[in-house]
Amino acid sequence: MTALVSISSAAKSFGGKRLLDVALLELHAGDLIVLSGDNGSGKSTFLKMLAGLEKADRLGLSANGLAADAFGYPRELRRLIVYVHQHPYLFNTSIADNIRYGLRLRDMPVEERERRVEEAIAWAGVGPLLGVPPQRLSGGEKQRVALARAKVLDPRVLLVDEPTASLDAQARVQVIELLQRTATGDNCVVVACHDRELLELPGAKRWHLEDGKIEVTGDR
């Protein structure tokens, strides 16, 4: 099976200490990968490096005929690989404006842009929240809006950092369902987390980060 993303190397040091030294990993269409590891092990840094948001000491990444290294990350790759922060920042506008933000930056025609926004709102189930100021949303609601904002960009790879941290049971179920629905067809999802429900999710692939290395432990 041809890999959606191939990672030949990903290395990063802080203060002379090696945090990450990862090699030979692949992401495939339909994968839902759960990345575990202790706090401070480098999970967030690794995801940000894959998304081109964190400078790497060494990076070898290829996807869809594009390649990135420590010296350059093609703009086209940023359309394929999208990162969702653990604490997503929402602009103090409307929910719909937050979701359409990335499409406006891409100068997408209005008709296509609004169609995608409507689809993302329905997909994330945030229609009832459209009149709520973003600052009044709960943690789970913010996560769903952030996932809709990422989904509307139609990425091939979605990197999600601790999406269920500090959420109540109902909110966790909603977020996990969205992640499962995203990891289908031509897309894949990588989730960094400590959430046991995610770690034990049937069908998910397990990666574990320890001492800078990632161990692939297979499907559940």
Image (cartoon, rainbow, N blue to C red):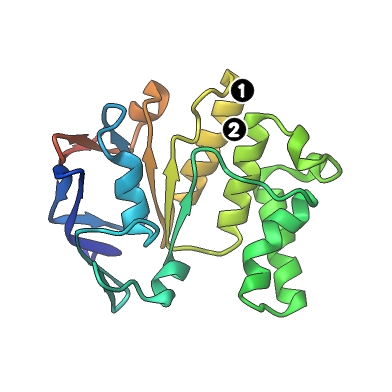
Q: Do the residues labelled 2 and 1 touch (CB within 8 Å)?
A: yes
Q: Can residue 31 be seen in this view?
A: no
Q: Quadrant of residue 70?
A: bottom left
Indicate the secondary structure of the residue bearing disc 2: helix
Q: Is residue 57 left or right of residue 95?
A: left
Q: Quadrant of residue 106?
A: bottom right
Front residue (pair 8, 183): 8
Q: Residue 178 carries which label?
A: none
* Image quarter of the N terminus: bottom left
Relative to residue 105, is residue 199 depicted above or below? Answer: above
Q: In this view, does 155 lie to the left or right of 20?
A: right
> Which residue shows up at 70% across the image and 62% down it?
100
> Which residue shows up at 13% across the image and 35% down it?
211
Relative to residue 88, is residue 41 depicted above or below? Answer: above
What type is the residue that disc 1 sits on? Gln
- Tell me the residue that label 2 is attached to: 174
Front residue (pair 9, 35): 9
> Which residue shows up at 68% across the image and 65% down it?
116
Q: In which quarter of the image is residue 27?
A: bottom left
Front residue (pair 149, 219): 149
Q: Percent from the top left, x then y, of residue 53?
A: 40, 58
For mark 1, does the 10 Å Cα neighbourhood hold few (<14), some (14 to 19), or many (20 or more) residues? few
Q: Can residue 135 be seen in this view?
A: yes
Q: Percent from the top left, x then y, of residue 150?
A: 56, 55
Q: In this view, does 88 lie to the left or right of 204?
A: right
> Which residue shows up at 37% across the image and 62% down it?
52
* Image quarter of the C terminus: top left
Q: Percent from the top left, x then y, of residue 3?
A: 24, 64
- Tell me the residue that label 1 is attached to: 170
What type is the residue that disc 2 sits on? Gln
Indicate the secondary structure of the residue bearing disc 1: helix
Rounded to the nearest whole Å, what is the CA distance between mark 2 and mark 1? Answer: 6 Å
